[in-house]
Amino acid sequence: MDKRSPRLPSSQPLRGRGESAVLTPASAGSPQEPARAEETSSIRSHLRLVDDPDQDDAADAVEEAPSDGSLGRAWKARQAQRRAERITKFWGLFEGGNPYTNYWLVLGPTIALAVFGLTMVLSSTSVDAGGQPFTTATRQAVWAGIGLLGMLVMTVVPTRWIGGIGWAAMIIASVLLALVAFSPWGYTSGGSTNWLRIGPVQGQPSEVAKLALVLWGAAVLARKGKLVSQFTHWMMPLVAPGALSVLVLVLAGGDLGTSLVIILIVAALLFTAGIGMRWFALAGLMASGAVALLMWITPYRMMRVYAWLGMNCDHPTEPCYQTEQGLYALASGGFWGVGLGQSRQKWDYIPEVHNDFIFTIIGEELGLLGTVTVLGLFAVLVVGIFRVANGITGQTYHARFVKLVCIGVISWLVGQAFINIAMVTGLIPVVGVPLPFISYGGSALTIALIAIGVILNFARRQRIESRTPRRRTRKRRKRSTLARPDTT
């Protein structure tokens, strides 16, 4: 082991590689101070270059950075490009996807909403004073079974038949609506004559009219092709006499809520077909004026408008009672709810609790979590249907028909759900519009499931086409342009 004492640094400058360094500080005022300071700076710069190259690179980058702000603009451009890529990737979840995934994105939320609706109908009607708590839920389950059977049938029928089914459904719906409005078989409930009762069987023909308008209107617009941009071709026969006749028959029974849904369906079909926006602005003004006039001339509708504005809420039995009790139910649910089957407001505090106001019971028993779950299921259903529509390419009759039907079904189900939820939360006046798949109503549930069957038919066809291998064609060998032409 080396026991020699360490050698102290000398005060003499070190000579090496053309550089010098002073290891002992010079006294102030010495004439050699500037030279020694320069030599010290050189040694430190050399050591920094050897020990910390990253620092030198950063220093060089700062020295070489232009002063015109181009680096900042380039950084902002890169950030904008990254944001655009993330948005494109996120939007790709809505537009594209595997045909197998699209099929289950439509079927899964539909079954979940139907089962959820049966559960809530049973919960809201289990306090029936007649001593039969399962009667209403059992009847709804029977209609759900019929709807599932119809959905299965519509899933497997040939796709080319669906347009013809739309024409037949349009004729049947018009006849049934005429029977409701002008025959003794029409049944009045809740101020509107929109039920058809023949013996022990009753239903709402207006639900059949919604599906008929979607299928028939899509078939008409798809057949016209590019001619639909002309006024006469989109006006006849879709708007007049088709949609107008259905709308007049529905309004003859006093059902304003269903009329709004029908207007929404027709508007969505025309928008998808490519009608000019000026026509929508004009039609919107005319529809708003007509709705305002119908409310003004009908006393019970004006009473609901006054209740929405809070002008006749002095007495607990006034028209504000239903809306106020529904808000109490939503407020008492909190985040987790009071528990399934533990609602207080369903004990005859809210009229039509199992029908139009069933969303309030969901909020009370299952809380905010339950209501958000319902909205999430509808959102997933919309994504699935939209992806089915986007999976069809081209400008053929079939491609146009599929897109129109998908958008029509979305506008029907989601638009009706929006109107119902806005009604029970006090955003709009009370109108008789049920919540699709969840509210009590056999004909509404059955027709909605059949409409989903049509979408599943399109998704099933996309699955089959993606699974079928394409026929390989024998490629001809390309002749070189330098070869001599064949003169034989």
Image (cartoon, rainbow, N blue to C red):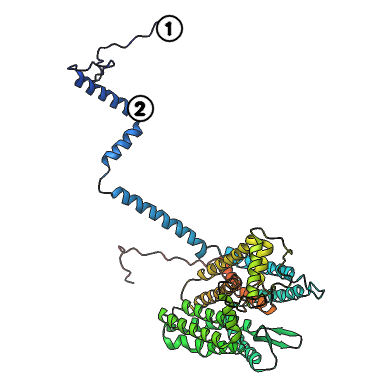
Query: SS for tag 2?
Result: helix
Who's the residue at 76% across and 88% down the image?
Answer: 199
> Which image quarter: residue 153?
bottom right
The answer to whether 360 appears left or right of 229 in the picture is right
Look at the picture and state if 151 lies above or below 39.
below
Q: Nearer the viewer, residue 482 or 187?
A: 187
Q: Tell me the residue that label 2 is attached to.
A: 51
Who's the residue at 70% across and 91% down the image?
Answer: 185
Q: Nearer the viewer, residue 238 or 330?
A: 330
Cα separation, mark 2 vs mark 1, equals 29 Å
Q: Nearer the viewer, residue 460 or 313?
A: 313
Q: Which mark is residue 384?
A: none
Who's the residue at 45% across and 87% down the image?
Answer: 233
> Of the residues shown, which amino acid type is indicated by label 2?
Asp
Badge 1, how many Cα within 10 Å: few under 14, some, many 20+?
few
Q: Tell me the residue that label 1 is attached to.
A: 2
The answer to whether 74 appears left or right of 209 in the picture is left
| Residue 76 in view in this figure | yes
Badge 2, how many Cα within 10 Å: few under 14, some, many 20+?
few
> Of the residues shown, which amino acid type is indicated by label 1?
Asp
The quadrant the C terminus occupies is bottom left
Q: How far across and down, in percent of the image, does residue 341 sit?
A: 74, 64
> Which image quarter: residue 382?
bottom right
